[in-house]
Amino acid sequence: MDEHADSHANTTTRSVLLLRAGGRAFAIYAEECECVTPWAEPAPLPHAPAPVLGVAPVRGRMRTVLDPSKLFEASGQAREHNAHAFIVSLTGDEQLALACESSTTSTLVAEHLSPSDPPAFPALGTFQHDGETVHLLDPARLFDAAMSGTERRRQRAVNSE
C-alpha cells in the first residue's frame, strides 16, 4: 500500500468560512454559520463596548452584531476599518452575528491549525491561508470576549435626597 496515500487517509479536513474585517483574516467552521446576508446597519446599543456594533434583523431574528477585528485590538491600537459588506449569522442560542468586508469558503486541514500565540481569548487557534495568518474564532467565546472589561449591567444612579 502507498505510504503517501495512508497519510492522507488519516487527515481530517473541515470546511471553513473565511472572513475579512478591519484588515485582519478570520474564520469560523462552516457548520457554525447559519447564513450570510448583505450589510444592514445595526441599531447601536447604549454603553456597548467597541466590538458590539449593535443589533440587526436577519431572517426575522434580531442578532447582536460583533466586529471581530475589534476583539483583537489592543487599547489605543486602532486599525483602518473598511466599510462592512456582510453580516454572518452564527448558529446557536446566543443569536450573534459577525460584521465583515468579505467572505469565502475554504477547507482547513486540522493538522495546520496552531494554538494562538499569544493565546487569543475568542480564537481556537490560527492557520495560514495565502501567506496570511487567519484566526479561527470560537463562537462560544465571542460574546464574553466582546464584553470583557465591561459590566453586564450599569448601576443606576440612586437619588440620595
Image (spheres, helix red, strand yellow):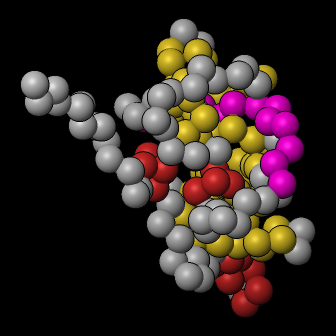
Residue 102 in sight here: no
Of 137 and 144, which appears nearest the observer? 144
- The residue furthest top is 60
* Up-down relation of residue 155 to residue 122 (above or below): above
Say which residue appears at 58% left-offset and 46% top-offset.
50
Say which residue appears at 40% left-offset and 34% top-offset.
94
Q: Is residue 110 left or right of residue 63?
A: right
Residue 136 in sight here: yes
Q: Is residue 161 left or right of residue 43?
A: left
Of 88 and 7, which appears nearest the observer? 88
The x and y percentages for residue 80 are 84, 54
* Up-down relation of residue 37 to residue 23 (above or below): above
Q: Quadrant of the C terminus?
A: top left
The x and y percentages for residue 106 are 78, 54
In the figure, residue 6 lies in which quadrant? bottom right
Q: Most prominent secondary structure in the magenta stretch?
A: loop
Q: Magenta residues, as a range? A: 80-92
* Up-down relation of residue 60 to residue 75 (above or below): above
The x and y percentages for residue 150 are 38, 50
Say which residue appears at 82% left-offset and 41% top-offset.
101
